[in-house]
Image (cartoon, rainbow, N blue to C red):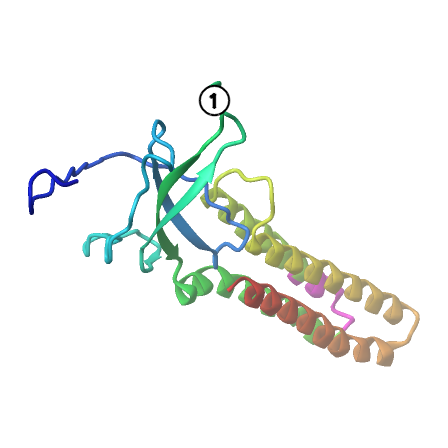
Amino acid sequence: KPVKDGEFYRQVVRVNGRFTRKLRLDDYPFDRQTLAVEFEDHRSGSGDLVYEAGEGAATVAPTLELPGFLIGTPRLRVETSGYPTDFGEGKSQTYSRVRFELPIRRPLLTYGAKLLVPILCVILCAGLMFLFHPKYVDSRVGIGITALLTVVALQITLNDELPEISYLVLMDKVYLGAYLFMLSSLGVVVRSTWLIERGNVARAIKVDPQALAVLLSLFLGGTALLILTSV
C-alpha cells in the first residue's frame, strides 16, 4: 500500500509448516497427483481483501526431490469461495483464496517394469500348462497351482506397500484378471482330463491351444485397456 509519494509498503510473510494430503490411488501405479496448499484470511471477506497472483509467483526450489515421483510445473490460482454457514455472524460472505498446486506423477516405465513384468512372467509360465500333453495331468495342475500361489504372494507384497484403503487400485484389478486366467486355465485342464478319460484324445489336444489363445488375449487386452484408461 502507498506510504508516501512514490513509496510503497510491502508485507512479506514466510510460512513454514508440515502439510498432509490423502491421495486417491485408483490408478496406482499410473496415478497423477496434485499436492495443494491453500491460503485464506478467515477474518476479511472478499469485499475487504482480494489476493493477486503475480507473474511467475509459483515456483519451487530447483533442488526439490520427491523419491519415486516426477515433479511437474507448479501452478498458483486465486479463487473466491464461500461456506454453507454464516459462522453465527448473521450474514454469509465469500473469501479470497490462494491455491498453490504442484502436480506429480510416477515414472511410467519404471513402475510398469517393477509391477507388471513379474505378473506377466507368471502368466506366461502358467500358459505352459497348455503345452503339455493332456495326459500329464499332475504336471499341468502343478504349474497352475504354483502360478496361482505366486500371484497371491505378489499381491500381498503390493498391499504391504500401500496404505489401508477401501477400494481397488489398478493393480488389484490386474491381479483379479490374473486370478481369472489361472482358474479358467485349471478349468480347461479339468475338462481336457475328462475328455482323455472318455477316450477323446484328439479333441482334448485341440482344446488346449484354443483355450490358451483366448485366455491370454483376454488377459492382455483387459490389462492394456485398464492401463490406457488410467494413463
**Within the magenta stretch, is there residue 32?**
no
Query: Where the N terminus falls, by quadrant?
Result: top left
Q: Amino acid at mark 1?
A: Phe
Compared to residue 2, the image places residue 55 above or below, namely below
Quadrant of the rendered structure where residue 105 is? bottom left
Q: Position of residue 156 (x, y in %)?
A: 54, 46
83 displayed left or right of 192: left
Visible residue check, residue 185? yes
55 displayed left or right of 76: left
Visible residue check, residue 132? no
168 displayed left or right of 187: left
* Residue at the right extreme of this rendering: 198
Q: Position of residue 114 (x, y in %)?
A: 44, 61
206 displayed left or right of 29: right
Quadrant of the rendered structure where residue 217 is? bottom right
Q: Residue at x 50, y 20 (%)?
A: 90
Q: Residue at x 75, y 65 (%)?
A: 137
Compared to residue 84, the image places residue 66 above or below, namely below
Residue closer to the observer: 183 or 217: 217
Tell me the magenta residue range: 134-143
**Within the magenta stretch, is there residue 142?**
yes
Label 1 neighbour load within 10 Å: few <14, some 14-19, many 20+: few
Q: Residue at x 10, y 38 (%)?
A: 3
Compared to residue 87, the image places residue 178 above or below, namely below
Residue closer to the observer: 6 or 221: 6
* Residue at the front extreme of this rendering: 5
Instruction: State the residue position of label 1.
Output: 87
Residue closer to the observer: 40 or 210: 40
Q: Position of residue 164 (x, y in %)?
A: 52, 38
Q: Residue at x 6, y 44 (%)?
A: 5
Is label 1 in a helix, a strand or a loop? loop
